[in-house]
């Protein structure tokens, strides 16, 4: 005879479905009834995870994996070599080894991220982080990550905003990878002007020296492979500076994971895929 504890997950799942039938949740992007994407977590196959996104919105948000640069996560017109990089990044010297993104920073993902930055509940961050894991699981696992670190906010900015979306995303990815999420290793010691208001070269100088590894935490990153997590990457200046600091303090390698990658022209522009209207472009482009 099965014990109550072993039957509880199934009972909970059934109850959850009854509640959904009576009060169905809606897609957090367009407000329609989602066609649930059930992803079975390895830790509990009996409890399917359902994303609060409809199929149409998922297709709009997610970039095709083979049309994303493995080095900078930028959108491509065609596949390119991992080592060489795309036309936008092959002339850049990054301190991180690779980057992965869910999609390009454009509507509707851009609007969701802007809302997410001030959403204390964490529903949007957890939903998109789960989608990032679902769509890029192979690459994230292949990185062989030892721990996950979110891009930190300045304490004053955190006090004003009340939430760090990068940390919310990082916790979800760390749980899926089965590793620790460390929020106390890297600190932002210097207040900086918001990166979104600056051009490429100013972004690099603005962020230089803003981050440091807490001295007593250095042993936690020594020889480790780290996944650095943020919500959006534009020129990569912030992620690159933190990666430089981590490598300098002994980290073996750093990989970057973000929800969105803004299309910028760092080097030789890459061809953009057709079919995108002017209204779909990122507000920062």
Image (cartoon, grey):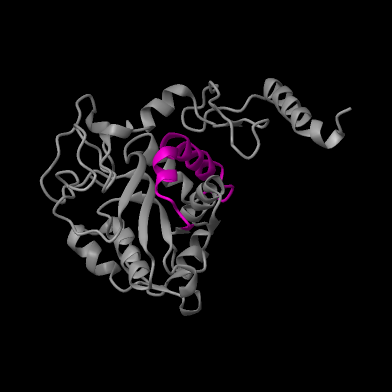
- Residue 220 magenta-highlighted: no
- Compared with 163, 16 (above or below) is above
Quarter-wise, where is residue 93 in the image? Answer: bottom left
> Closest to the observer: 260 or 26?
260
Residue drawn where x is 75% and y is 28% of the image: 10
> Closest to the observer: 233 or 218?
218
Tell me residue 28's x, y (percent).
51, 33
> Closest to the observer: 173 or 25?
173
Is 232 left or right of 155, judged from the image as shown?
left
Tell me residue 61's x, y (percent).
38, 32
Is 166 left or right of 120, judged from the image as shown?
left
Residue drawn where x is 25% and y is 38% of the image: 75
Tell me residue 285's x, y (percent).
23, 45
The main secondary structure of the magenta stretch is: helix
Is 139 left or right of 17, judged from the image as shown?
left
Q: Image quadrant for the N terminus?
A: top right
Residue drawn where x is 34% and y is 72% of the image: 210
- Where does the magenta region start and end? 119-148
Quarter-wise, where is residue 153 in the image? Answer: bottom left
């Amino acid at each position: 005879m099965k014990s109550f504890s072993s039957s509880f997950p199934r009972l909970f799942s059934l109850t959850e479905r009854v509640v959904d039938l009576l009060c169905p949740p809606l897609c957090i992007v367009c407000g329609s009834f989602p066609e649930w994407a059930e992803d079975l977590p390895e830790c509990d196959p009996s409890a399917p995870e359902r994303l609060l996104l409809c199929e149409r919105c998922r297709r709009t948000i997610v970039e095709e994996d083979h049309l994303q640069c493995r080095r900078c996560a930028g959108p491509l017109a065609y596949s390119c070599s991992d080592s060489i990089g795309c036309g936008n990044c092959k002339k850049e010297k990054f301190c991180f080894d690779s980057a992965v993104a869910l999609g390009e920073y454009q509507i509707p993902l851009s609007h969701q991220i802007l809302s997410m930055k001030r959403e204390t509940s964490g529903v949007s961050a957890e939903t998109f982080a789960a989608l990032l894991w679902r769509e890029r699981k192979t690459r994230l696992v292949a990185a062989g990550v030892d721990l996950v670190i979110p891009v930190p906010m300045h304490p004053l900015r955190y006090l004003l905003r009340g939430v760090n979306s990068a940390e919310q995303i990082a916790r979800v990815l760390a749980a899926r990878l089965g590793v620790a999420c460390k929020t106390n290793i890297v600190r932002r010691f210097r207040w900086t002007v918001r990166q979104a208001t600056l051009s490429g070269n100013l972004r690099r100088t603005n962020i230089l020296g803003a981050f440091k590894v807490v001295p007593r935490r250095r042993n936690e990153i020594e020889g480790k492979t780290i996944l650095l997590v943020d919500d959006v990457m534009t020129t990569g200046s912030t992620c690159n500076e933190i990666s430089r600091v981590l490598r300098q303090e002994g980290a073996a390698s750093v990989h970057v994971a973000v929800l969105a990658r803004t299309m910028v022209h760092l080097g030789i522009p890459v061809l953009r895929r057709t079919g995108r209207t002017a209204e779909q472009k990122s507000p920062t482009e």
